[in-house]
Amino acid sequence: MSMATEEAHDPISDQDQKRAALGVIKEAWAEGWADGIDGDCLAQASLFCALTELVSTYGEDATARFAEGLSRRISSGEFSIVLARQ
């Protein structure tokens, strides 16, 4: 066994994992845009991947309950990015 596999690793916090995952997703989007893939296509493919993973992890009922709340969250601006004007 190598020294690296013998060392105990500190668990990565949920917040750090989410931050790292967002970075990976942003890189994939940038690569897709660079390859000429439309943003709408990237968004729909991302939603499909996300929902299939949630169903796989939590089941259809729990994922459906989660998705039911998305309309309210979208309407309240939770996913809107406000750009500052100078």
Image (spheres, rainbow, N blue to C red):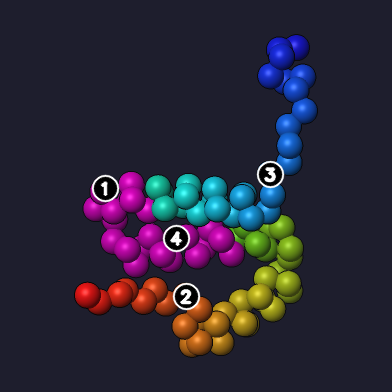
- Name the residue type under label 3: Ile
**Residue assigned mark 3:** 12
Ranked by sequence position, the earlier of labels 1 and 3 is 3
Ranked by sequence position, the earlier of labels 3 and 4 is 3
Magenta highlight range = 29-51
Could you tell me which residue is drawn at 31 percent across and 74 percent down? 83
Q: Quadrant of the C terminus?
A: bottom left
- Horizontal and vertical percent for residue 64? 67, 76
Say few, some or many: other residues with alpha carbon within 10 Å of mark 2 (under 14 / 14 to 19 / 20 or more).
few
Camera-side mark, 4 or 2: 2
- Name the residue type under label 1: Asp
Residue 71 in sight: no
Tell which of 52 and 19 is nearer to you.
19
Ranked by sequence position, the earlier of labels 4 and 1 is 1
**Residue assigned mark 1:** 35
Say few, some or many: other residues with alpha carbon within 10 Å of mark 3 (under 14 / 14 to 19 / 20 or more).
few
Q: Given contact means CB atoms under 8 Å apart, are the residues at marks 4 and 2 in contact?
A: no
**Residue assigned mark 2:** 79
- Secondary-structure class at tag 3: loop
- Horizontal and vertical percent for residue 28? 40, 48
